[in-house]
Amino acid sequence: MSFPVKIDGIGTRLKSDGTFNEPNVGGHRSKFVRLFAAEAIAKGDAVAIDVGSDANGLGNHIKIADGNVNAISFGIGVAAEATPTGHDFSTMDDPAILVQVAGFCDFAKVIESTCEPGQGLSVSDTPGIMDIRAGATDSVLALQLKDATPSSDSAATSTVYLCNPLNL
């Protein structure tokens, strides 16, 4: 007898025929997930689940993570692609973009001037950018592996290991 190992997953999975809306009910963990962007997002931005939207199913929308806003302060991954240029979020359907949630990622935005390799990273107070995990209540989104060369505090050039905090 077979049954789902994991039924609490969120995110929409791409079916083999290229369509969406296949629920995540399997027991395997993904390195990449495709979620609906609720705002303009750039490649390398740290992202969080948009708990304010239930369009396309609760937990299927993301926004740029921001440590100053409780609803989007829990980072889940890094945008692996940007939202389409010129997309009008007020009148068009939200686009689904690829988000990396686990493994080695060499296009993350990190405040490198305060971080060193090996440190745990969480969402910073600067939207879309990760920084040193500040306190015991901050979740670890990633581990800093390598600073970019040349160093930059906002470019999508840092190498991190994403920890998949939601077990997607």
Image (spheres, grey):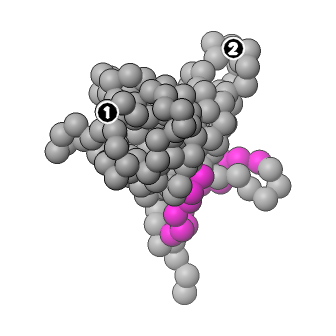
Q: How many marks?
A: 2
Q: Earlier in the sequence, mark 1 or mark 2?
A: 2
Residue 13: % across, % down: 64, 52
Q: Is residue 32 above or below residue 130?
A: below
Identify which residue is drawn at 51% across, 57% down. 103
Taking the image as drawn, is residue 72 in sight?
A: no
Please tell me which residue lies in front, 133 or 49: 133
Task: Determine which of the numbered discs, if any, sits on residue 101 in the image.
Answer: none
| Magenta stretch encompasses residue 28 | yes
Residue behind mark 2: 88
| Magenta stretch encompasses residue 26 | yes
Give me the C-alpha separation between circle 1 and circle 2: 36 Å
Residue 115: % across, % down: 34, 38
Residue 110: % across, % down: 43, 34
Name the kind of residue labelled 1 in the image: Thr
Mark 1 packing: few (<14 Cα in 10 Å), some, or many (20+)? few
User: In the shown orientation, is residue 105 left or right of residue 18?
Assistant: left
Magenta-drawn segment: 19-32
Please tell me which residue lies in front, 132 or 46: 132
Residue behind mark 1: 114
